[in-house]
Image (cartoon, rainbow, N blue to C red):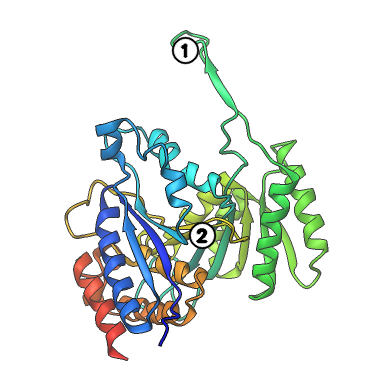
Amino acid sequence: MENTTKTRRIALIPGDGIGVEVATSARAVLAALDARHDLGIRIDEFDWSCQRYLDTGALMPPDGLETLRQYDAVLLGAVGWAGVPDHVSLWGLLIPIRRAFSQYVNLRPVRSFAGVTSPLADADNRPIDLVIVRENNEGEYSEVGGRFGRGGPGETAIQEAVFTRRGISRIADYALELASGRDRRVTSATKSNGLVHSMPFWDEVVRERADLRPEVELVEEHVDALAAKLVLRPESFDVIVASNLFGDILSDLAAAVTGSIGIAPSANLDPTGENPSMFEPVHGSAPDIAGKGLANPVGMLWSVVLMLEHLDAGEPAARLMDAIEASLRDPATRTADVGGTASTEQVTAAVLDLLAAD
């Protein structure tokens, strides 16, 4: 009988620090899901990292983007290490991938989980379930600007923010469509009282797009007030849409509110499907705990859930999410950052046992 299993090609970039450790967890879990669900997963691993930069002068080879273009998805551990400035590591790998493949949506779900507590999170009595939709290709993270007079008393740096009607429209449309299947509320992060050109433009375009989706309620919040409300009333939000910089900051804040940035996932999406999308945990390379077995693999495994959903593998994605939730309920299968005692390997083993159990 002809094998009709769809092949899903994944480029795995472990990167640096704990990225390598959580990438090992992802490999093990994907292998288990593939064996059970016949997903046709094929993983190729690439050693693109800060160590490669120190050895060769580049985080990835000149044909790196063309290599990745052949894959259905990219799974990234983390990038960043001592001796390599953060702007070098970011612009040498992550941002080129996001922009070359028009991954204009950065999707960051934020949830409270039973067993994971913080001064602000209580899954039983105060459940948090929101999604931050961050514009991922333009805004404040542009390459427009420069420095002059280096080293002198008048040294000057100019960094321009770039906002386009197309860029704002498509991220607003994505957020509104997402909200229509949830609680039908979108909060738009702005700062139009201080940024007199970019943010009024953002507001105008978001309102225009929201007028086309009358079933979704649009609320506008200045980003400083929104940050405060995320701390005071995180359970009151559904979908938040924000520019590149505002979304970056708010999503880390929201993850911390629920108990740990170690469990936070993200997806860099090209919603058209013309290019591969990329999936990564939010936590970074964490050099201070690298190699100690302390890394929380949940952020990476939840990113795998997002990747499987994107690759039309909904059933195994749901099974993995159930296993993640179950592992978080017990301190014996949680890492220390979420009040547990388990190592990275022990959490991974627990998730694998849960996947095999039913």
Where does the image place residue 356, in percent across and percent down from the top left? 28, 86
344 over 323 or under it: above or below:
above
Look at the image and tell me whether residue 157 can be seen: no
Q: Nearer the viewer, residue 326 or 274?
A: 274
For mark 1, give the secondary structure. loop
Where does the image place residue 5, in percent across and percent down from the top left? 43, 78
Q: Which of pointers 1 and 2 lies earlier in the amino acid sequence?
A: 1
- Amino acid type, label 1: Arg
Quarter the N terminus occupies: bottom left
Residue in view at x 35 percent, y 80 percent? 323
Look at the image and tell me whether residue 42 can be seen: yes
- Amino acid type, label 2: Val
Q: Give the label on residue 150, or none.
A: 1
| 1 or 2: mark nearer the eye | 1
Quarter residue 105 falls in: bottom right
Does residue 281 appear left or right of residue 271 in this picture?
left
**Residue sitting farthest toward the bottom:** 358
For mark 2, give the secondary structure. helix
Residue in view at x 28 percent, y 38 percent? 52
160 over 182 or under it: above or below:
above
Residue position marked by numbered label 2 in the rendering: 231
